[in-house]
Image (tube, rainbow, N blue to C red):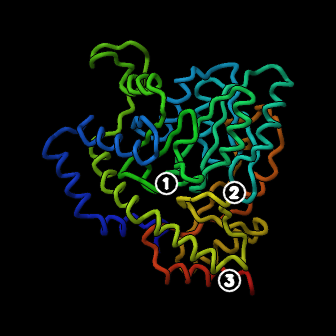
Amino acid sequence: MQFRDLKKQYDTLKPSIDASIAAVINSTSFISGPQVKELEDRLAEYVGVKHCITCANGTDALTMALMTWDIGPGDAVFVPDFTFFATAETVAFEGAVPVFVDVDDATFNMDPDKLEKAIQAVLDEGKLTPRAVVPVDLFGLPASYPEIRRIAEKYSLKILEDGAQGFGGMIGDKRACSFGDISTTSFFPAKPLGCYGDGGAIFTDDDDIAAYLKSIRVHGKGSYKYENIRVGLNSRLDTIQAAVLLPKLQAFQEHELEQVNGAAAAYTELLKDVVNTPMVPEGYLSSWAQYTIRLENREQRDGLQAALKTREIPTMIYYPISMHRQKVFTGMKLYQECPAAERLCETVLSLPMHPYMEKADIEIVAETIQDFLMR
């Protein structure tokens, strides 16, 4: 059993992926080939925004968004305490201060009430300027954007949506990667839409922001390759990765998103009376980057992980260390306690999950969990 079965996905999509890669090789347009622009157009249309700017990876996507707003020293940027390191890392890399916000136990995402309290704490101290909030669409579920947008507007903050895990998710009729003033995603292979290497994208409706991002992803270029009008990065999505993503995007739209939601529903039906299963609020749709259950404590979680391993069932712990406890942030002021994030670090366990998962495998996983917890 695979945790996320990329081999099975490739076997299913092999003819279209191979043909798409071969077209790039035959054309030798390995950098900025026509497939990149085609992918950007299709991604923007799917998400429902005006512009998509691809780049080398999801971390660069966050960095480039922060550069757009000139985030830097003296600025406070609010990030969830329970997330992958890049969300806070990119803020610190720009010289700004990541302010850690506690999350909701049930959704794993930033708690809007805790966000407002963190903003007030920073304002009361008077040393930093609140500039932006970076909600994360963790495990595929969009963050609470209606509430976060209200708070952001109240305090004149920009919203940078970290949709690295959330591509395909929805609130009502709006897609993930359309909720921020700028939104980003990652095409790391295990993501809901993944390539065969690193890749990322940035989404915006703002023409000026789009033009700036297109410039800084290629060394701050101006009207042509050898005119440089600002300091930028080398952060292009290569053409072969775009070629991989084009047929995968089509499959994602046509059946994978529906299939992964079917797998999640099967898990929930089998496990809802045995363990804390993921909660999807009414009106929301998850793209299920992970299917993550919560156990009672660390001992039970680790015991279950070991029991699953004996049956060759792979699992992962996302994430064992909260942001404010990472060594690199030692000594940084904590503007609020984050008990929910710390509980999750001790109790979460992610199960095998992908669009091509067989019902029989889901039943084996559920049976093993039931046997362990009921003995």
Seen in the image, is 151 located left or right of residue 240? right
Q: Amino acid at mark 1?
A: Gly
Q: Amino acid at mark 2?
A: Thr
Instruction: Indicate the position of residue 254 as horizontal and vertical percent values.
Output: 38, 62
Along the line of sight, which residue is nearer the eye, 218 or 263?
263
Instruction: Indicate the position of residue 328 as horizontal and vertical percent values.
Output: 67, 36
Seen in the image, is 217 located left or right of residue 114? left
User: Considering only order in the chain, which callout, 3 or 1, is on the residue closer to the N terminus?
Assistant: 1
Give the residue at x 70% y 40%. Answer: 148
Q: Nearer the viewer, mark 3 or mark 2?
A: 2
Is disc 3 placed on a helix, strand or loop? helix
Q: Which residue bears the numbered disc 3?
A: 370
Q: Amino acid at mark 3?
A: Gln
Q: Which residue bears the numbered disc 1?
A: 168
Determine contact: label 3, label 2, CB under 8 Å: no
Is disc 2 placed on a helix, strand or loop? loop
Q: Nearer the viewer, mark 1 or mark 2?
A: 1
Quadrant location of residue 117? top right
Q: Which residue bears the numbered disc 2?
A: 107
Q: Quadrant of the C terminus?
A: bottom right
Q: Say the numbered circle drawn on residue 105.
A: none
Task: Using the numbered discs, state the Cα–Cα distance from disc 1 to disc 3 in whole angstroms.
Answer: 31 Å
Instruction: Indicate the position of residue 135 as horizontal and vertical percent values.
Output: 64, 42
Quadrant location of residue 272? bottom right
Give the residue at x 79% y 53%. Answer: 340
Label 1 Cα crowd, 10 Å radius (few <14 / some 14-19 / many 20+):
many
Q: Is residue 355 above or below residue 131?
A: below
Task: Using the numbered discs, state the Cα–Cα distance from disc 1 to disc 2 in whole angstroms.
Answer: 17 Å
Task: Using the numbered discs, state the Cα–Cα distance from disc 3 to disc 2 in whole angstroms.
Answer: 23 Å
Seen in the image, is 364 located left or right of residue 57? right
